[in-house]
Amino acid sequence: MPNLRSIIQDTHRALEVVGIPDARLESEVMVMDVMRMPRQSIFAEQETEVSAQQQEQLATIIQRRLTREPLAYILNHREFYGVNLLVNSDVLIPRPETETMVEHALFMALMGMESRELIIADVGTGSGAIAINLAIHLPAAHIYAIDAFDPTLDVAAYNIRMHNVTDRVTLLKGDLLEPLPQPVDVVVANLPYLPTARIPTLQPEVQWEPVAALDGGPDGLEHIRRLLQQASDSERLKPHGVILLEMDPEQMSDAQTAANQAFPDAEVSMEPDLSGRDRVLVVNLGGTSPDY
């Protein structure tokens, strides 16, 4: 029987030939999943033999991946901000860029709003990635996780149960802020922000993801503008409230204009992601941000 080293090498080559990004890393993740091994073990146990059954399981994964189906959908899980989540084709695959929004929400909650019991709305919750992390790190907060689609909410519900935060996360179905039963302190939203015409030009893996979670209209800001309008036209956001919106850095200028129009007295700023590009638009109705 072949050993672990040769299996990883063969898998790497099979993925690399068709141009799959990060082929080496993905080959290791596939083997870790099939072998039920932690990452350190696949390097420490290179001579371990791989059984015929394990080879068959790996071959099935590879064949699906060669169709450019995302690995997260094949393995049915994705790690986000240190939390492992169920994902399938009903939800967008959580991206590392979105961790910036989680970090900023936590910073504002812990530094600027620590004296209050926070009410947070995660709009367009998808897999529940943001809501779950906020619930884990802010045990005194309550989070409303909102989405418009039942299959998406089913995935979020599973993840919320799996991470034991059902007492702090309430799922709501509806359009953006409309289902909220009370005003909130913080709105976090990773809404669809890709321009419609751009979606067919993206890498093949993206085409497997739900269009409703990607398509932000002609300029990508359709849902973001609607959320800002809903927030300004209603009592769904407290007077001191904060809105955090993820988007493409190239959209920041137009989004900032929309935010200033909706909230002329608010402080509007931008937060960079790990690569240094502006990724999160911050609308602070209180007019001042916590000191960094």
Image (tube, helix red, strand yellow):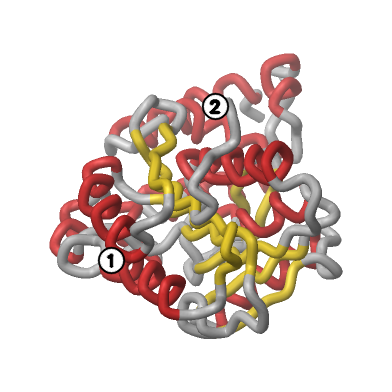
Above/below status of 194 relative to 18: below
Q: Label 1, secondary structure: give it.
A: loop
Quadrant of the rendered image containing residue 217: bottom left
User: Which is in the foreground here, disc 2 or disc 1?
Assistant: 1
Quadrant of the rendered image containing residue 228: bottom left
On the rendered image, what quadrant is the N terminus found in? top right
* Residue drawn at x 39%, y 26% as measured from the top left: 275
The disc at residue 216 is 1
In percent of width and height, residue 155 lies at 63, 70
Tell me if label 2 and label 1 are in contact, CB under 8 Å. Answer: no
* Residue drawn at x 24%, y 54% as measured from the top left: 257
The residue carrying mark 2 is: 8
Quadrant of the rendered image containing residue 145: bottom right
On the rendered image, what quadrant is the C terminus found in? top right
In percent of width and height, residue 35 lies at 71, 38
Above/below status of 14 relative to 121: above
Q: Which amino acid, by three-letter code, is at mark 2?
A: Ile
